[in-house]
Amino acid sequence: MINFDCGPVVNRAANGEGVPHVHRLGRKSVISGAAWVAATAVLWPTAASAAEEACFDREKQPYTSVVDGHLHFRPFGGEAVPFKEMVGYLKKSGVRHASVFGIGQRLPVNSDCTYYLDCPGTAVTPSLKNDMANAENVVEFKPKDVDLTLSMTFPDLADPDSVPAGMRMLDKEYPGMFRWMGEVNLIKQAILPNQHEPADLDDIRRWAPFMERLREREIPLTIHSDLGNNENPTQYLHLMREVLKRYPENKIVWAHMGLSKELTTMKPDRHIRIMKKLLDRHPNLTLDLSWRVLEDTYFSKTGIREKYADFLDAYPERAIPGTDFVASRNKNYKVYEQELEVTSRINKALGDEAFRNIALGQNYFELLGIKETAPQICEA
């Protein structure tokens, strides 16, 4: 049996000496500071042992998520972090399940850019190349100890007629390997200067053929759809409403809860109210809590973290975690480690049910039909 009780978690100071450090914050006893790195010492048990023989002790164990439901193994351009090295980041940080996203918006091969924002005017175009590269790496290296879910990121939602052919190609070359679709862009304002063509209402109506295939195979679809911007916070809400109304049986994951760098001043109460209405009306909608923009711009503000924690506690089965890390070669483990910690801070404020479902992965398992069970939370 693998025991979850790993003893006191240490806060490693700059001189490398460990000092036991546990304190209370909000409603739960949590680990503070750098103590979360103790996740590297946590071994994820089998489903049977987790369900029957162990519990998760929030006072002693890390608050960082063991699932990364939004992780880009490929960059927009340039060299990627080698696949085996990226898998090593997951193991080292305590992540045991991850969705392997490519990047649907690929910069030209002759471009020196690795990030679209550094190259306004340079076109980013959907491509199968990153999805195939991810699949080839999974086939070649056959990673163990980390469960990886390959995702199709090639679809151009403004050109839906091209999507079924791409799906057939991936199915032919990698039968049964792709169990997710996304992150795909409905409207992403950040890449409008890079000739991004948003999908419109007519395009959404023409998604029906590939949405039917996703539905038949119970494949989740992660959509990046900006809610709006500081000038008009709900400018694009009608697009997501149309998707949810037209395809109610599809598993839709809304990336970043619709938030972005273009929308930093929306009143949290208004945002939460919109999310609640959509969740109530559309039972197959799941919210994606990835990207540090959520923490930096919203969750970290005084009084606001509690609002979002209360919201997630009220809908504990409707969200999954993620980092939105993009594995370009100019990044390393320390960057991934930080992204995981920052995007996991909301976990500290969650009640036990939401913590188990989100941070410990139960929602992710059920979304994918994975026969694994997150451990129960130890009683205080």
Image (spheres, grey):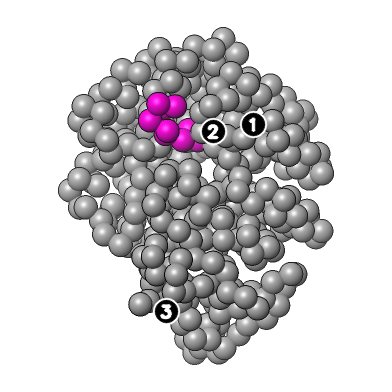
Left or right of 280, for residue 186: left
Query: Is there CB contact under 8 Å for labels 3 and 1?
Result: no
**Residue at mark 3:** 3
Residue at image coords 40%, 37%: 180
**Residue at mark 2:** 252
Residue 153: tell me if it is visible. Answer: no
Q: In which quarter of the image is residue 255?
A: top right
Q: How far apart are marks 3 and 1 (CA)?
A: 39 Å
Is-magenta flag for residue 288? no
Number of numbered labels in the structure image: 3
- Of the image marks 2 and 3, the number of the one nearer the N terminus: 3
Amino acid type at circle 2 is Ile
Depth-wise, is mark 2 or mark 1 nearer the camera?
1
Q: How far apart are marks 2 and 3 (CA)?
A: 36 Å
**Residue at mark 1:** 282
Q: Residues within 10 Å of mark 3 (few under 14, many from 20)?
A: some
